Image (spheres, rainbow, N blue to C red):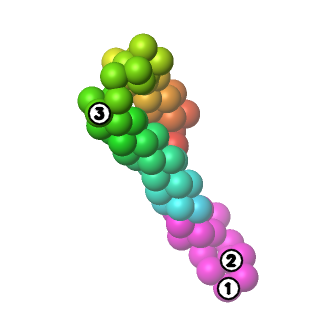
Amino acid sequence: MTGKVLGVNSPYLAMLLHQNRRRFVLRKLRNLWYTDLFLLKLTYQQKWLRDYFSFDRRYQYIRQLTEHEQQRGRV
């Protein structure tokens, strides 16, 4: 059954909504990654930050977020 919403085919509209949601999720995960890279560069410059920032722990957290989003079908 193909209906129209505002003059646009429903399957096409659903595909566009899914793509936009996927782009938003990927952008969010990418921003987390780039923020961590920035903090990693700071830890090389500031020794006191090494005690508070664990890049490996943050990497595992981002991986878990990515796997969760993949299981939900967003990525």
Magenta highlight range: 1-16
Quadrant position of the N terminus in the picture? bottom right
Query: Which one is in front, 23 or 40?
Result: 40
Question: Element under label 2?
Answer: strand
Question: Element under label 1?
Answer: loop
Q: Does the magenta portion include 27?
A: no
**Quarter assignment of residue 63:** top left
Residue at numbered disc 3: 45
Image x and y of residue 74, in percent: 51, 43
Quadrant position of the C terminus in the picture? top left
Q: Is residue 31 left or right of residue 14?
A: left
As drawn, the residue found furthest toward the bottom would be 7
In percent of the image, x 68 and y 77: which residue is there? 4
Q: CA distance from mark 2 to mark 1?
A: 5 Å
Identify residue type, mark 3.
Answer: Gln
Name the front one of labels 2 and 3.
3
- In this view, 41 is above or below 24: above
> Which numbered circle lies on residue 4?
2
Question: Element under label 3?
Answer: helix
* Residue 31 seen by the camera: yes
Image x and y of residue 19, in percent: 49, 59
Image x and y of residue 31, in percent: 45, 47
As drawn, the residue found furthest toward the right would be 6
**Quarter assignment of residue 35:** top left
> Which numbered circle lies on residue 7?
1
Q: Does the magenta portion include 3?
A: yes
Identify residue type, mark 2.
Answer: Lys
Q: CA distance from mark 3 to mark 1?
A: 57 Å
Sequence-earlier tag: 2 or 3: 2
* Residue 75 seen by the camera: no
